[in-house]
Amino acid sequence: LLAQAPSGMRAVWARRRNISGPDPAMQAYQTDFIELAHRYDVLRFGEFTLKSGRVSPYFFNAGAFSSGGALAALGRCYAQRIVESGIGFDVLLGPAYKGIPLAAAAAIALAELFSLDVPFAYNRKEAKGHGEGGVLVGAPLQGRVLVVDDVITAGTAVREVIAMIEGAGAELAGVAIGLNRQERGEGALSAIQEIEQTHGVPVLSIIDMSHIIEYLEQSGGGPPGALAAMKAYRGQYGV
């Protein structure tokens, strides 16, 4: 796909091809993502009990990006993060269900913003027994596959997708997500760190918890006590 990019973008990719994490300074698209998430109540502050039993001071629900404009803006954020990373890949894959519109939106934005015509695919939860059949729809899973999803919590869903990719004879290039909670699991590592170490691929996030804290510090936004609660939670559970 790099060969298809305009010359200026090829130069950016060449400079950044070994970078998997966000730049130290928050980029404009990351601020846009946080503001978009806040506007659509995707990102909320308060007290939320997670499946793990932890009480989190914030909650992220990508399903609330529920309009055409929001999805278009979201696709641009994913596209910019993917290009910024310089990751090499051949196909985008959106896991059912939330990953399906995210991969489609990212593919559209890559074509419109960067002239990268990227094949994309998605899977069904249950195999179809008629018509084209199978669990995969769209482009064949060939070469290096970049998975596009909203978040990684326990990592179970991603491991299932990795097995599907390998079963098709393709290779996992990496995973692109909206939010990295930077939060350890039962052990010392987060689910994202475990995936990176086990499979040797990067997990790209548009934002992580530290970006939300930085945004609250700079903007003074959020309800009273949100910033202090975020910092306390990071101190207790952060990685």
Image (tube, grey):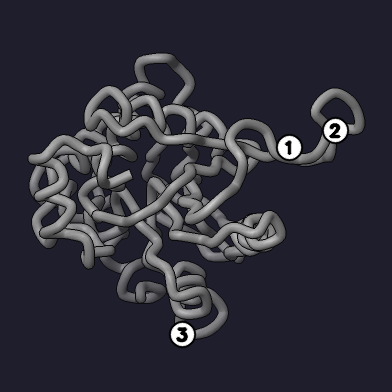
Rounded to the nearest whole Å, what is the CA distance between mark 3 and mark 2? 40 Å
Q: Label 1's element?
A: strand
Rounded to the nearest whole Å, what is the CA distance between mark 1 and mark 3? 34 Å
197 or 24: nearer the eye? 197
Taking the image as shown, residue 114 lies to the left or right of residue 49, namely: left
Q: Residue furthest right?
A: 129
Q: Give the amino acid at mark 2.
A: Lys
Q: Residue furthest bottom?
A: 188
Residue that carries the numbered disc 3 in the rendered image: 188
Mark 3 or mark 2: whose residue is earlier in sequence = 2
Q: Residue at x 21, y 49 (%)?
A: 84
Q: Give the amino acid at mark 3.
A: Ala
Taking the image as shown, residue 230 lies to the left or right of residue 176, namely: left
205 or 34: nearer the eye? 205
Q: Quadrant of residue 50?
A: bottom right
Q: Residue at x 80, y 28 (%)?
A: 132
Q: Label 2 crowding class (10 Å Cα cut-off): few <14, some 14-19, many 20+?
A: few
Residue 79 % position (x, y): 30, 38
Q: Residue at x 26, y 44 (%)?
A: 3
Residue that carries the numbered disc 2 in the rendered image: 128
Q: Label 3 crowding class (10 Å Cα cut-off): few <14, some 14-19, many 20+?
A: few
Q: For the residues carrying marks 3 and 2, which lies nearer the camera in this image?
A: 2
Look at the image and tell me whether residue 238 can be seen.
yes
Residue 196 % position (x, y): 44, 72
Q: Residue at x 65, y 59 (%)?
A: 169
Tag 3–tag 2 contact (CB < 8 Å): no
Rounded to the nearest whole Å, what is the CA distance between mark 1 and mark 2? 8 Å
Tag 1–tag 2 contact (CB < 8 Å): yes
Residue that carries the numbered disc 1 in the rendered image: 124
